[in-house]
Each structure stands twice: as C-alpha cells, then as structure tokens.
Image: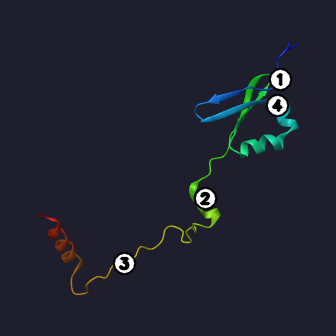
Amino acid sequence: MRGYGQTTAAPLYYIPYYNSFMDRIPIRSLNQDTAGVLARVEQGETVEITNRGRPIARIVPVDVDPLEELVRTGALTPPTVTLPFAMPTGAQPADQEAGDLISALRDEERW
C-alpha cells in the first residue's frame, strides 16, 4: 500500500561508467511499450529493466564505429583489395649479383 505523495514512477540513477542518466523501468512497462523504450535507447539513454524491483537487464545504446559512419554517409570508400596483395617490386640492376648488392647496402649502413 502506498502512502500519500508516493508514486510508482521509477527514479533516475546516475551510472558513472555510462556518463548518462539511467532510468529504471519494470519489465511490465517494457512489455507494454517496447517501441517507446527502444526509442529512448536510440536517443542515447540507458534503461535498466527490473523484475519486482530487482534489476535484471540493462539496455544500452550501441557505440557507432567512426569508420562505419563515414562509409555510411559516403565520405569514405571501403577498400576494394583484400589481403594478401602483391607488394611492388623495385627495379633491380641487371649487371650486379644479389650478394654484391647486399654487401653494398651493408657497407652504406656501417659508420
């Protein structure tokens, strides 16, 4: 039995890890207004679902990947080449042997 001035509205709770306010709603409200609850989550709100006053679930907004957002808006084009791809080969002098080239490169690195 509720006394005068008491309401059945769920209180807002601040959860520091989510950096936003979280509303607690009973599972019955979720069942009766699923679209409304999901619309609130879509707007960035975190909702905690309770069963007889005990928290049983939390619905949180999905983090959007910045790259996926750029691809979706058309500002970025996804790669068309899949790995592994052939590395470009540099020009190689035909008049030197491979061992001589390696020795020359090593001599350049020495101090």
In the picture of the structure, the residue carrying the numbered disc 3 is: 89
- Whichever of callouts 3 and 2 sits on the residue coming sooner in the sequence is 2
Q: Is residue 102 left or right of residue 84?
A: left
Give coordinates of residue 107: x percent, y percent. Answer: 14, 69
In the picture of the structure, the residue carrying the numbered disc 1 is: 8
- Whichever of callouts 3 and 4 sits on the residue coming sooner in the sequence is 4
- Label number found at residue 68: 2
Q: Nearer the viewer, residue 83 or 40?
A: 40
Q: Secondary structure at mark 1?
A: loop
Q: Is residue 79 left or right of residue 95?
A: right
- Whichever of callouts 1 and 2 sits on the residue coming sooner in the sequence is 1
Query: Contact (CB < 8 A) between labels 3 and 4?
Result: no
Q: Amino acid at mark 4?
A: Ile
- Label number found at residue 27: 4
- Whichever of callouts 1 and 3 sits on the residue coming sooner in the sequence is 1
Give coordinates of residue 108: x percent, y percent. Answer: 16, 70
**Badge 2: residue crowd in 10 Å (few <14, some 14–19, many ≥20):** few
